[in-house]
Image: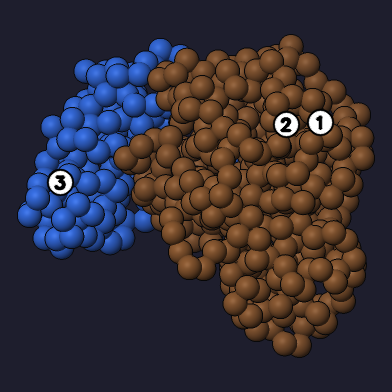
Chain colours: A blue, B brown
Amino acid sequence: MTAYAKPLPTLEGLNGQFFAWCKQGELRFQRCEECGTWRHVPREMCAECGSMKWDWQRSSGRGRIFTWTVTAMPLHPAFKDATPYAPVVVEMDEGVRVVSEVVDCKPDDLAIDMPVEVVFDAVTPEVTLPKFRRA
Amino acid sequence: MSSAFSLKDRACIVGVGQTEFSRPKGVGKSSLVLQLEAASAALADAGLTHKDVDGIMPFPNLGTAEELAANLGVENLRFATTLQMGGAAPVASLAVAAMAVSSGAADCVLIPAGWNGYSGRRARDTITEQTSSIPGGAIARDFYMPYGLGAPPQWYSLMARRHMHEFGTKPEQLGAVAVAMRKHAQLNPAAVMHGKPMTMADYLASPMVTAPYRLFDCCLETDGAAAIVVMSAERAKDRAKRPVYIMGGASGRPYPADDITNRRDIFETGLTIAAPEAFAMADIRPRDVHFAEIYDCFTFEVVQQLEETGFCPRGEGGAFVEGGRIEVGGALPVNTHGGLLSEAHVLGASHIVEAVRQLRGEAGARQLSRADIGVVTGWGDFGDGSIAILRR
């Protein structure tokens, strides 16, 4: 079995906590305890109210395609054999956006506002990446 | 904006220089050598010597002020700073250099930029090689790279697709930018694409790199350098060439700057914030501008920057670039040298050089008949932006 060759997150700090939840099969984002604002990517402080109090709240896991690109030429050696592939930006029901991919949709079939829901892909024993499927 | 102190017209560009632009096979001249050559040319252009320099503003990650100063023999380095804005740095440096020379913090500021963008590390490897090299590096490493979203054309194409969805912007409109840049390169012997004309049919037939960006939507990767020298308006009067005045300048960052996907406004860039400030400083409006050298990393970014600068309303940039409006002879010529798309990728510094040549009347076959006021923009990282308004 060939080793997973694509880039992996480093699992440190707040980013590491995000991926620790993913490893448990849960998509969670930070939510400010004072004003309730959701945020992603992980940050130390609430940009809306300035509070440093937050916790990891579970996302509905549902969202819509906001935009994407279809990469036809390999721009990174690890993705040489993956082209054409489509990194997408999903806007979650909570309002935050995540970069990901849609596992059951060909790049040419993607559409703005297409509803999707999260799935989890344990790409290595240490790392689980959140991905999406049509909803 | 009202203020007792205005930066308008207090500083000038007194010298510009550039190296040959090339795509060498094998190892090319080093980034340092290229920058020193361009610096020497700019200082000679100004009628100055290396010893006259007392301020240096290097480009991010392409050498330190200390190394440049040691090589140039700058013994009295009083002012040195790097603006961490990627390709937006050279243009952003103009206003900061103007602040330095206006206040007396420096008398002669050198702004060099150059690299082996072809024979060495290429722009597409920015994140791959060193995630600390740009402010959003760690975010890209953990949240973009695992999905293969690692290179500039991929990041910006996310905005382009959304723009096409919201405003109906068409591939042919992006093509109009590519065709105009290539047309201008035919008038510029220094351009890498000089002698290589391109039609709209050629553009549409070019292979897709990362949709909607085709090969000819993407800027060149080249080796080369350019340099700019700034002094106060007072000191500029004694220099070799007629000075070019910095009427206005500003820079800005989108929000949040380090994550291109969670933007409050997906089309807002640093330029959105900087342009009104620069025009207020210059006390003019976009319609007063005769030409624009716009940081054309990709064709769509020209459409976007024309909108965000205020040359046309948001969403109308596609129509604005059609019909020859942005070509030499049109109402607002853009990138009269061919730009990053068809002259060379010199990190935005060559756009400043071209603006100065137009304003001085030195642009040869591509000289505009009306070139009294010009705009130069810079773009970097995930959409940091800068703008300078220059006049003869």
| Chain of the residue under label 3 | A
Q: Which residue is mark 2?
A: B333
**Taking B376 as reference, is B33 left or right?**
right
Q: Nearer the viewer, residue A86 or A23?
A: A86
Q: Nearer the viewer, residue B387 or B235?
A: B235
Q: Which residue is mark 3?
A: A37
Q: CA distance from mark 3 to mark 1?
A: 49 Å
The three-letter code of the residue at mark 1 reads His
Residue at 69% from the left image edge and 15% from the top image edge: B323
Decide: marks 1, 2 in contact (CB < 8 A)? yes
For marks 1 and 2, give the one nearer the viewer.
2
Q: Nearer the viewer, residue B39 or B262?
A: B39
Q: Is residue A74 visible?
A: no
Tell me where residue A126 appears, x and y as whole percent.
30, 50
Question: What is the secondary structure assignment of the residue under circle 1?
Answer: helix
Tell me where residue B305 appears, x and y as whole percent.
55, 36
Q: CA distance from mark 1 to mark 2?
A: 10 Å
Rendered-image quadrant of the N terminus of chain B: bottom left
The three-letter code of the residue at mark 2 reads Pro
Toward which corner of the image does residue B336 lie, by quadrant? top right
Which mark is drawn over residue B184? 1
**Taking B181 as reference, is A108 left or right?**
left
